[in-house]
Image: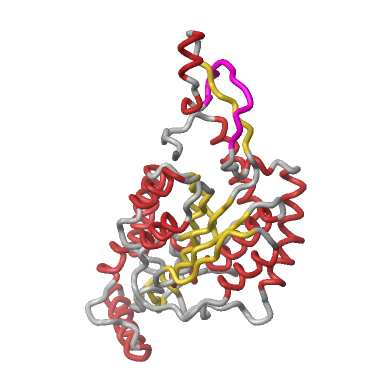
Amino acid sequence: MRHTRQTLRRQTLRRLRRQANTQPTGFSARTMWPFFKPVQVKAQAPATAPAGVTAEHLLRRLEWTVLRRLDGLLQGDYRTLLRGTGMDLADLREYQHHDDVRHIDWNVTARQTVPHVRVFTEDREMAAWFLLDLSPSVDFGSGASAKRELATEFVAVLARLLTRHGNRVGALLYGHGVDRVLPARSSRLHVLQLLHAMQNRPPAKTGATRLQDLLQAGATTVRRRSTVFVVSDFISEPGWQKPLGQLAQRHEVVAVRLFDPMELDLPDLGLLPMRDAETGEQVLIDTGDAAFRRRFSQVAAQRETELRQSLAGAGVDTLELSTADNLVEALLRFTELRRRRSQRLPAHMKALPA
């Protein structure tokens, strides 16, 4: 009976491969998953805004559904979100636990024989930059929305939240290379231009993502100390860790990591044709195979561990956004993360730029 079932499965797989022509030569589950990339169950829609959903409609909807709720929950406490770049000396006081050691005044400390720190008044006006990875892999989504739509909504909410209070936002957009730079400006119209640029993208080219190119372009473009949001799924060729760490030495960097639950745990959906979003390679897999699903989960968990270690080693804050997340709750988690960071002694003490 078992032999008959296996024979039937092999015959079914061969027939489906001939019909769909989806199995490339030499491509198998065994060679695919050690180099895990999220795949698309079917061809995704082109990287343009859905019919009828303009940048204006999207922003207006988010202003009513998300920004209004954030206004009530944050109660005007926007200082916990971002720190300004301008600093004026306000006072001197004795050093206390959790004070930043970079603010110790060594001349006063030597005279008083007790450590003293400088107290600064921060200028709330600041610039925020979005480094946006819009490569083909962010088109993936197993539910109602894809990672690209999640990224667009996150940028819309945070950019509008900042520009309403006089801050400037800019962006670098990456598809197959950095193809668009929007200078930092402060207006609702500028936010609409940014959303329009994200929604209306040129046709994506196949090829692996090089996240290091985006990070290096950001380091070259953003001269003044700013808050930089790296919005990506971090599915990239190796080598982006060092440029990210170098960027964090000059700027306040937040890694906004996009993911879909199906990238971590593959459900039993039977036979599925799957396509790699970036290389175009296709394969027919049997998700009913429990051993295959275990291998998938193991490789995904290993990648998760390595990714979190790389982000921590670069000294950046990380906000994880799932396509199944509620955006308001995710932003509140981010606010709490920033609040805790401002209260604790930094793990990576980096000299402030001259």
Q: Quadrant of residue 353?
A: top left
How many marks do you count on the picture?
0
- Residue at image coords 74%, 61%: 63
User: Would residue 191 be counted in the magenta stretch?
Assistant: no
Please say if 94 is above or below 18: above
Range drawn in magenta:
87-99
Q: Is residue 284 visible?
A: no
Residue 142 showing in the rendered view:
yes
Vertical position of residue 55 compared to residue 327: above or below: below
Position of 26 with respect to 285 (left or right) is left
Residue placed most toward the observer, 69 or 298: 69
Instruction: Name the one closer to the observer, 338 or 190.
Output: 190
**Residue at 69% across / 61% down in the picture?**
187
Q: Of 149 and 5, which appears nearest the observer?
A: 149
* Residue sitting farthest toward the bottom: 19
Asked if the magenta segment contains residue 96, the reply would be yes
Camera-nearest residue between 136 and 196 = 196
Q: State the image quarter where residue 24 is shown.
A: bottom left
Q: Left or right? Give the position of 285 relative to 187.
A: left
Please state the horizontal and vertical placement of residue 270, each as a whole percent of the image. Answer: 43, 74
- Vertical arrangement, residue 117 with respect to residue 75, above or below: above
Q: What secondary structure do most residues of the magenta stretch adopt?
A: strand
Q: Quadrant of the C terminus?
A: top left
Q: Where's residue 345, x and y in %?
A: 49, 29
Q: Please state the horizontal and vertical placement of residue 83, each as a whole percent of the image.
A: 59, 41
Q: Could you tell me which residue is drawn at 45 percent across and 72 percent down?
A: 179
Q: Residue furthest left?
A: 26
Task: Classify residue 40 by image quadrant.
Answer: bottom left
Q: Position of residue 72 (x, y in %)?
A: 77, 47
Q: Quadrant of the N terminus?
A: bottom left
Colouring convention used in this rendered image of the protein: secondary structure
